[in-house]
Amino acid sequence: MALAFWAATIALAYLSITVSSALIFVLEGVSLVLVAVVAVAVIGHGGYQGHGIATPPLVPAGLGLAALGPGIVFAFTGFSGFEVAATLGEEAGHPRRVISLSIVTALLVSGAVYTLMSWVETIGFASPTALSQATVPLVDVARIYVSPTMATLVNIAAVISGFGAQLACVNGANRLLFAVGRAGFGGRWLTRTDPTRRSPIGALAVVAALSLIAFLPFTVVTPLDAYFDLATYGADLIIVVYLLTVIAAFVLSLRQRRNPIQLVTLLVGVVVVGYVLKGTVYPIPRTPSTIASTRRQSRSSPARACWPCRRRCASLSAPRRFSLSMPTDVARGAV
């Protein structure tokens, strides 16, 4: 199945950006509609047993920065990718207006959906313990408040949404490599394009090969473990990229003597993202061998060990941290 999705992604990325972008829009739109139906059903029922709607999950009362840090790491996993629109600047009709609007809109919409659905999952269960024991909270909520058929559809929507996200990532990676090759790094063959579709076939070949090679080690683990590994390391790498990007923007703005407000904003971004990165690597997580041993012992437990991010999952599952700083859908493997 994974190989089939990989092949489909590469084939669609080879087509024009118009085709793949339209497909992404449709796939994600279908997923959002199904998720919205579940949200309306839960809120319409008043949450758990009709009296579960409450605002405390929206307020991180009593939580310090040390408690919010791990939640922010998972949040990056949940709605990162909004910046991919920037890679399509050269193919947009009015890039300075369209790309800026696309990035801001994508960030606001994804953040709103992420926050709303985290809250919906929270009020849909009897307690933090019940939520933490749910294998896929959103699917369980759909089954309880709508129907088993809706739960199946939500599962399918998660796969569809994941495929759309994968296609968007491949499109972005293609164009980044193309720009790198055009700047003189990595060889001229990275700048090769299809004469008809104008897609960057040189960069696409590299992305296809590297993604396939990176996928192979995960064929020997369970799908859930593969997701945990990819989500954890992926979030770490995303945070590093965000930090480097904000630093580069700050240095460029400083050299060009930009507006002081812009400089201060970028400096705040460096501090915030830097703190999140620090919370990711320090205190140093336990070694893989120790965590793997703990994971084997916890197979029979409802609260599954999350290798290699078990330290974070354990901290996020504590009742005192039960809020939207704890995106349980990501921590437990739901979309």
Image (spheres, rainbow, N blue to C red):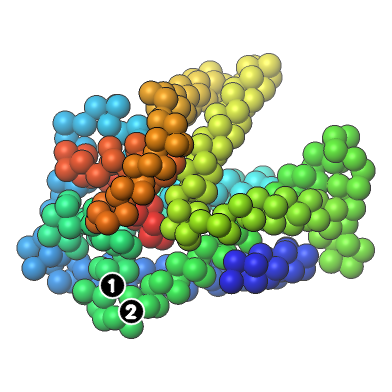
227 w.r.t. 66: above or below: below
The quarter of the displayed image where residue 140 is located: bottom left
Question: Badge 1: few (under 14), some or many (20 or more) residues near its Cα, within 10 Å?
Answer: many
Residue 218 in the figure: left or right of residue 17: left
- Residue type pointed to by label 1: Ala
Residue 254 locus on image (x, y percent): 63, 17
Residue 329 locus on image (x, y percent): 34, 55
- Point 39% across, 57% down: residue: 333
The quarter of the displayed image where residue 48 is located: bottom left
Residue 224 locus on image (x, y percent): 43, 58
Residue 35 locus on image (x, y percent): 36, 68
- Residue type pointed to by label 2: Met
* Residue closer to the observer: 156 or 273: 156
Can residue 16 be seen at all in this image of the molecule? Answer: no
- Point 15% across, 64% down: residue: 47
- Circle 1 residue: 142
Q: Quadrant of the N terminus?
A: bottom right
Query: Does the CB distance between marks 2 and 1 fall below 8 Å?
Result: yes
- Point 25% across, 54% down: residue: 301
- Circle 2 residue: 150
